[in-house]
């Protein structure tokens, strides 16, 4: 991966910042949990922001009652990531595979299309995950929508999801989420 370059400005978020997990930002993004209980499942996810400013998404995934997912989502936001090529997340996980989910104004059957990409974590190790927007796949309630395209200028929701069909406890820590482009990652 090319060298990462981010500009630091005192009192302001990083260049390309999406989520740095400050107290002000937490209020504006309005994070919340949505578990498989919406379909009768029994998974239980929770989140907290540590005193170090790390998002901790954790809980127990259950496959009972056709369950099997837990997600953390922002409320409706309006973000314009025009000019960015993708997202970078700095995460420490439990070795499981998670998904990044983004929504725009795209709809299918009156519902919000989710643009997703899966990423693997390394147990107990901080890593940076790079997700190019061109790799995001559209879906709606499990229906793949290959004709839907992600519009970075119209981001309405940011989320993380665990749905790997592995019952048991989980934990994902996120230090930050940022956009990148060839201007910010040192690529030509």
Image: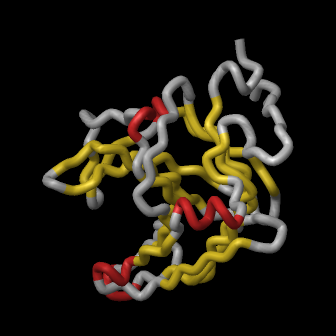
Q: Evaluate whether residue 103 shows in this view.
A: yes
Q: Quadrant of the C terminus?
A: top right
Identify the residue at horizontal 29%, vertical 58% (top origin).
142
Q: Is residue 178 above or below residue 140?
A: above
88 left or right, relative to 1: left
Position of the N terminus, as image quadrant, is top right
Residue 109's place in the image compared with 6, above or below, is below
Q: Quadrant of residue 87?
A: top right
Q: Give the residue at x 22% y 56%.
A: 111
Number of marks in picture: 0
143, 152: nearer the viewer: 152
Q: Nearer the viewer, residue 32 or 79?
A: 79
Q: Nearer the viewer, residue 54 or 58?
A: 54
Residue 77's spot in the image, x, y percent?
A: 44, 53
Residue 71 horizontal side relative to residue 106, left or right: right
Q: Residue at x 38, y 41 (%)?
A: 137
Instruction: Place residue 168 in its image quadrant.
Output: bottom right
Q: Kindly give the residue lying farthest to the left in the view shown.
A: 109
Position of residue 72 measured from the top left corner of the image (x, y, whole percent): 51, 67
Residue 164, visible in the rendered structure: no
Q: Quadrant of residue 97?
A: bottom right
Extreme residue toward the top, this view: 188
Indicate the colouring scheme: secondary structure
Residue 151 on image: x %, y %:
38, 33
Q: Left of 20 or right of it: where is 8?
A: right
Seen in the image, is 104 located left or right of residue 48?
left
Residue 18 location (% of width, % of height): 61, 47
């Amino acid at each position: 991966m090319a060298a990462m370059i981010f500009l630091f400005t005192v009192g302001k978020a990083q260049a390309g910042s999406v989520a740095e997990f400050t107290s002000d930002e937490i209020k504006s993004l309005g994070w919340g949990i949505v578990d498989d209980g919406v379909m009768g499942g029994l998974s239980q996810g929770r989140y907290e922001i540590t005193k170090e400013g790390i998002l901790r998404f954790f809980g127990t995934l259950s496959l009972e009652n056709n369950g099997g997912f837990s997600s953390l989502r922002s409320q409706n936001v309006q973000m314009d990531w025009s000019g960015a090529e993708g997202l970078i997340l700095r995460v420490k996980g439990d070795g499981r595979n998670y998904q990044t989910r983004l929504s725009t104004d795209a709809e299918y059957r009156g519902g919000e299309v989710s643009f997703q990409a899966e990423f693997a974590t390394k147990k107990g190790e901080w890593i940076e995950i790079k997700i190019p927007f061109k790799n995001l796949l559209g879906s709606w309630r499990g229906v793949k929508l290959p004709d839907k395209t992600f519009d970075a200028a119209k981001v309405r929701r940011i989320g993380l999801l665990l749905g790997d069909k592995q019952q048991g406890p989980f934990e994902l820590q996120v230090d930050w989420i940022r956009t990148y482009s060839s201007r910010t990652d040192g690529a030509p």
